[in-house]
Amino acid sequence: MTQIEIPSGTLEYVEKGRGAPLILLHGGTGNIEEWGGCVDGFAHHYRVIAYNRRGYGNASPRYDYPPDFFYEDVRDLAALMDALGVGGPAYICAFSDGATIALLFAVRYPD
């Protein structure tokens, strides 16, 4: 895994493949490892980016859970995409809390 600095801290991620970006968001009780072999499988067709959200793995810690903490994750996702040069549309595959973040992200950044 590679670490990357974003304005609000550090995230860790893996990136494989080429093509349209596909971002994998894990749920609230796991981490990037939940995607297992999916990264390699999807990498045959996409530029796959999977990352540990704030508070998971070696990403920056989450010190509390305010009512709007999902929006912090939305900002982190936008910052990660910017730092990795993912401009324009991207596919997002998510489950559980990750799906909530994906939906909020789509509303906030429809492009």
Image: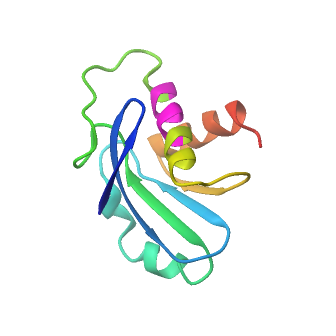
Extreme residue toward the right, this view:
111
Scheme by which the image is coloured: rainbow
Depth check: give the residue in front, 29 or 64. Answer: 64
Seen at 56% across and 39% down, the residue is 78
Q: Where residue 34 sits in the image (x, y, percent)?
A: 34, 62
Q: Quadrant of residue 82?
A: top right
Depth check: give the residue in front, 52 or 17. Answer: 17
Seen at 54% across and 57% down, the residue is 23
- In this rendering, is residue 50 above or below 68? below
Q: Is residue 63 left or right of residue 72?
A: left
Asked if the magenta segment contains residue 88, the reply would be no
Seen at 42% across and 32% down, the residue is 7
**Quadrant, the N terminus:** bottom left
Q: Where residue 97 sits in the image (x, y, percent)?
A: 45, 40
- In this rendering, is residue 72 above or below 86? above
Seen at 39% across and 29% down, the residue is 8
Magenta stretch: give its range: 71-77
Asked if the magenta segment contains residue 73, the reply would be yes
